[in-house]
Image: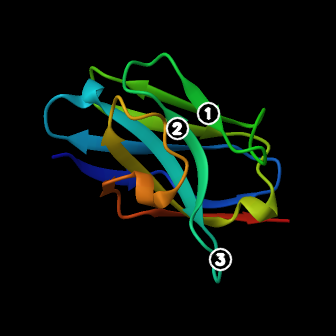
C-alpha cells in the first residue's frame, strides 16, 4: 500500500504559478503510476495529468497541456504538479492518486486505488 499527502495549494491571481507536491509513504514507489485529479464545486472529479511508474510516459488533459507539468522524484518518493499561467477555471481541490504500474496510465478516478486528501487551489481573476 501507499499513503499520499498533498500540499502546495493556495490563493493566487490569474497568470501566476503554483507547484503542488504529493509525498508518498511506503516502499516500491516506482511500482506506482501517479496521477493528479481536480474537483471543482458541483462538478465531478476530472483527470489532470499522469506519470507512469517507469517514468517513460506522461499524459495531460487538453485543458492544461502546455501549462502544467507533472514530475516525480523517486528518491524523495514525491510527485509534483507545476502549474503555470493559472486561470480562474483551474480553481478546484487537487488530489494526487496512485495505482499499481503496468496497467496503463489511468484517466478516471476509478482507475486509481490510493488518494491524497486534496489541496485547494483558488485562482482569482
Q: Earlier in the sequence, mark 1 or mark 2?
A: 2
On the image, the x and y values in percent for residue 16 come to 75, 47
Q: Nearer the viewer, residue 30 or 116?
A: 30
Q: What is the number of callouts on the image?
A: 3
> Residue 38 lies in what quarter of the image?
bottom right
The label on residue 96 is none
Q: Are marks 2 and 3 in contact (CB under 8 Å)?
A: no
What residue is rendered at 39% in x and 50% in y?
97
Q: Are marks 1 and 2 in contact (CB under 8 Å)?
A: yes
> Residue 123 lies in what quarter of the image?
bottom right
Residue at label 2? 50
Residue at label 1? 59
How far apart are the two marked residues, 3 and 1, measured between alpha carbons? Answer: 22 Å
What residue is rendered at 18% in x and 28% in y?
28
Which class describes the residues within 10 Å of circle 2: few (<14), some (14-19), or many (20+)? Answer: many
On the image, the x and y values in percent for residue 41 come to 63, 80
Amino acid at each position: 500500500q501507499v499513503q499520499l499527502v498533498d500540499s502546495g495549494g493556495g490563493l493566487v491571481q490569474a497568470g501566476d504559478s503554483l507547484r503542488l507536491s504529493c509525498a508518498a509513504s511506503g516502499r516500491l514507489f516506482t511500482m506506482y503510476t501517479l496521477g493528479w485529479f481536480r474537483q471543482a464545486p458541483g462538478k465531478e472529479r476530472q483527470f489532470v495529468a499522469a506519470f507512469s511508474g517507469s517514468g517513460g510516459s506522461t499524459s495531460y488533459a487538453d485543458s492544461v497541456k502546455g501549462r502544467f507539468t507533472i514530475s516525480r522524484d523517486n528518491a524523495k518518493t514525491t510527485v509534483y504538479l507545476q502549474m503555470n499561467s493559472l486561470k480562474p477555471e483551474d480553481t478546484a481541490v487537487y488530489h494526487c492518486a496512485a495505482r499499481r504500474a503496468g496497467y496503463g496510465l489511468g484517466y478516471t478516478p476509478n482507475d486509481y486505488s490510493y488518494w491524497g486528501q486534496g489541496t485547494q487551489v483558488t485562482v482569482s481573476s
